[in-house]
Amino acid sequence: MRPRKELSKQEGTDRDFVVALARGLEVLRAFRREGEALGNGDFAARTGLSKSTISRLTYTLHRLGYLSFDPETARYRLAPPVLSLGFSCLAGLPVIDLAKPYMQELADYSGMPVALAGRDRLTMIYLERCRGSNSITLAIDVGAHIKLATTAVGRAFLAGISEERRSEIIEDIRHHEGQAWPAIERGINDALET
């Protein structure tokens, strides 16, 4: 129920923050890469929002065309307009156009795949990838999420940000990982030292 906690940090403290919009976006974020259909109970479990709130949000998102609804199963799937948001996002990231020639040059030189990712909470999301000539391929598609704390790209991200911001993110990771934290912390610290 982590998303609900993240929302509560902002509720009531920022007059410009639209809680209903944030909750609607949390419903869209509840879907995972597997593309499964979700019912209102699934959304409630994944977001920490009440079932009555979920019911109003899914109804609204369905009416707006962002969710498709199967009346036989009472489950929702993401609808094509959500995809248009993703493509609009990628088209609006000039860093991709800037980085791609250098990424391809590195992939050609090393023979290995090269990827560009951006942070999405405690994960990294692939924004672009280039293939090298080696038979080793990066079998992760643009849009895929991988863990920030345990991957090279995530640890590179942590190394490249300010110490203050890194401390905040590491605290969130520590809270999220629970008992696995000591091993993950060692891996992060080792990566930051190199």
Image (cartoon, helix red, strand yellow):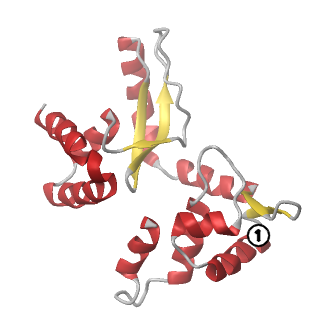
- Indicate the position of residue 49 as horizontal and vertical percent values: 55, 76
Of residues 4 and 84, the one nearer the viewer is 4
Of residues 131 and 29, the one nearer the viewer is 29
Image-quadrant location for residue 42: bottom right
Image-quadrant location for residue 45: bottom right
Q: Residue furthest right?
A: 72
**Which residue: 27% across, 40% down?**
155
**Which residue: 15% across, 34% down?**
190
**Which residue: 39% across, 71% down?**
6
Residue under label 1, please give it.
62
Does residue 140 sit above or below 107 in this rendering? below
Does residue 112 sit above or below 3 in this rendering? above
Image position of 153 (left or right of 57): left
Judging from the image, what secondary structure is the residue with disc 1 in? helix
Image position of 136 (left or right of 169): right
Does residue 66 sit above or below 103 in this rendering? below
**How many marks overall?**
1
